[in-house]
Image (tube, coloured by chain):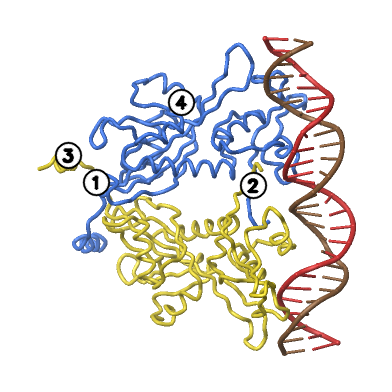
Chain colours: A blue, B yellow, C red, D brown
Amino acid sequence: MNEQAENVLNYQSNKYRTPDGAPADIVIFTITAEGKESTKKSLPVRELQVLLIQRKQWPFAGQWALPGGFSKETETIHESARRELTEETGVADVHIEYFNVYSTPERDPRGWIISHAFLALVHEKLLEKRQAADDAADVRLFPIGEALAMDLAFDHSLILRDALAQIQRKMLTTTIAREFLPEEFTISELYQVIQSVVPTFEERNFIRKITSTQSRKGIIEEVLDLQGEGKVSNRYSQRAAQLYRFTDYEPQLSIYS
Amino acid sequence: MNEQAENVLNYQSNKYRTPDGAPADIVIFTITAEGKESTKKSLPVRELQVLLIQRKQWPFAGQWALPGGFSKETETIHESARRELTEETGVADVHIEYFNVYSTPERDPRGWIISHAFLALVHEKLLEKRQAADDAADVRLFPIGEALAMDLAFDHSLILRDALAQIQRKMLTTTIAREFLPEEFTISELYQVIQSVVPTFEERNFIRKITSTQSRKGIIEEVLDLQGEGKVSNRYSQRAAQLYRFTDYEPQLSIYS
DNA sequence: AAAATAGTGTCTTTAAGACAATATATT
DNA sequence: AATATATTGTCTTAAAGACACTATTTT
């Protein structure tokens, strides 16, 4: 027996109780956009939605819950979360980030189970196929307000509240809005995305601020066409609007400067 | 046997491998202040320090590591972290926050061990007694630069780098500077604390900005004496400086407004 | 007086904030 | 022409940024 194996055995012989599992649970957000009427060109109604699944087994059979699953000893928790996300939605290469751990002793009747919560931002289009394919009624998007009012399995209502606070904070302090937008978008679209996540957000001179303030210049840039003229879109509007794209610049915020 | 016990047994019979432990590791930061010479009044040199312990046992015996320990099934990870902090430093009621999970399969030779990393901010004064009491050379404060250059046990060098990035971000976006300052402090002290955590921070008109800009007004306020006059201190300076204290106000940052 | 730290005056440029007005396309 | 969305003009006030200058106390 080599030294390490011996050490491990010595160590394990006087071991305490160990956890019964370390799952990753994922709050999958998307923003749906629906035109008011198909005949008129007008701004769509955007709404923040969250994906929930209906449990089939004990515990909490029949109740809605966040998607998730136990991590394996051969992967990191982060890899586990990505795997679950792909299994559940069929999408990969989307924004996913870890945000908190939940370990209250009585949170899971199956035992001592420490849950690691992630949030994922998925573009509506990527979920469309999936939604159509298995419309089995046990996986559904819920408007965030509705989901918050539901009695979810485990401590998932708490996790959902925390996830919403996190995405709201990040929506205002980082450029994650890009995850919900096409590559090229109008200022109105950006404004709507922000508002659908942070309903209290209001900025009268929004277009001014984001396009003509030196300190913010650089977050987004105008898209030009082949002639070097501003490229515009009239998908939602009568008067065509200038298209923008996000740059690589991430502003650094500070309360002291 | 009741229904739940039966369910748990059914569930456990076809269980996968479970983790061998879910410890909390704590990056304990403090800022030391030393006067240049004891004879002259002058601004002290402030330096960000981190507390490390020297391991006595396998694995990584003899190497320096972050303090920490396994969590129990009767407590949350957060409670476990607080318990460890008190055991290690003798202090309670300080700022401690969770910031990340570390779960790379080979990170711990003892098995499948998922570590939860916290960072704590402790005022120098609270650590003084402790440092004097057990100066056993197996618990020490290291300047952050020195600690970063060391080869720490496990993946603790990575955890330390992440903790530093987190505390630097928070130093500029929240009022955690208060954790390193006395209740009443001068503008210079605040400036020094910020600079000791974020060395690149520089703001020529710092006093102007923080005291006479409407949008930042409210973060700190002048301390008044019994006569309603500004209370001043000359502990570090020739000319006495106005004392300030933090208010309850936490500014909300946004890249869009 | 020299040194060391604290704080103010002043000026220029930029940004915030409010809202009226104009522009461009659709119905 | 009415409507709907996009964008600019204009004005006032606040803040940023630079840097020389003054103030207070110790040595």
Dot in front, 2 or 3 = 3
- The residue under label 2 is which amino acid type? Pro
The image position of residue B64, as x and y in percent, is 41, 69
The residue where tag 2 is placed is A251
Which residue does the image show at 25% across and 32% down from the upper left? A61
- The residue under label 3 is which amino acid type? Asn
The residue where tag 1 is placed is B17
Can you say whether B155 is above or below C17 in the image? below
Marks 4 & 1, CB-CB < 8 Å contact: no
Q: Nearer the viewer, residue A140 or B10?
A: A140
Which residue does the image show at 63% across and 50% down from the upper left? A252
Residue A1 visible to an observer of this rendering: no
Locate residue B240 relative to residue B87 in the image: left or right.
Answer: right
Q: Nearer the viewer, residue A153 or B27?
A: A153
> In which quadrant is the N terminus of chain B drawn?
top left
The residue where tag 4 is placed is A127
The residue where tag 3 is placed is B7
Q: Quadrant of residue C17?
A: top right
Q: Residues within 10 Å of mark 4 (few under 14, many from 20)?
A: some
- The residue under label 1 is which amino acid type? Arg
Marks 1 & 3, CB-CB < 8 Å contact: no
Marks 2 & 3, CB-CB < 8 Å contact: no
